[in-house]
Amino acid sequence: MKSKVKWLDNMTFVGESASGHAVVMDGPPEFGGQNLGVRPMEMLILGLGGCSAFDVMLILKKSRQQVANCEVELDYDRAEESPKVFTRIHLHFIVSGRGLDPAKVEKAISLSAEKYCSASIMLGKMAEITHDFEVIEAA
């Protein structure tokens, strides 16, 4: 697999994934950026949220849960000094649907965190990662 990141100007870059999709990354004005895209470290945390949500949805669908919506809110801290790694990450899942089994939602989140989500397992080597969830009955 290969991906690439190409510098455009100032502090703006375009990343192209191995699957051929592109994303713009940029820095804040105080570092020479133009605020035209997501910060690179934000890409990491969004990747964690996406990887986790992907796993949770796949597991819930396989267990025949009728999910109407799934969101992950990420709350995190970074080190004060460089390298400013993530030190604490909390994922709050909000899953809505009809007749959802909270035990199956909890199990899906645990399986993602402990077995399937590569991003979670990698970032967990550096940061304390916690999870919780709420289940909402869809109308």
Image (tube, helix red, strand yellow):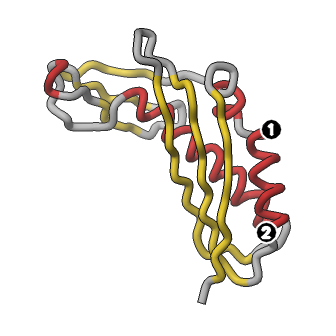
Q: State the residue at coordinates (71%, 55%).
A: 56
Q: Is residue 61 left or right of residue 52?
A: right
Task: Please tell me which residue lies in front, 97 or 1.
Answer: 97
Q: Position of residue 135 (x, y in %)?
A: 67, 71
Residue highlighted by disc 1: 114
Question: Outermost residue, front direction?
Answer: 80
Crowding at mark 1 (Cα within 10 Å: few <14, some 14-19, many 20+) = few
> Taking 62 as reference, is 6 above or below it?
above
Q: Is residue 27 left or right of residue 62?
A: left
The residue under label 2 is which amino acid type? Pro
Q: Position of residue 29 (x, y in %)?
A: 14, 27
Q: State the residue at coordinates (59%, 90%).
A: 139
> Taking 38 as reference, is 66 above or below it?
below
Corner quadrant of residue 117: top right
Q: Secondary structure at mark 1?
A: helix
Residue highlighted by disc 2: 102
Task: Please tell me which residue lies in front, 92 or 60.
Answer: 92
The residue under label 1 is which amino acid type? Glu
Q: Earlier in the sequence, mark 2 or mark 1?
A: 2
Q: Secondary structure at mark 2?
A: helix
Corner quadrant of residue 122: top right
Q: State the residue at coordinates (15%, 31%).
A: 34
Q: Position of residue 124 (x, y in %)?
A: 68, 27
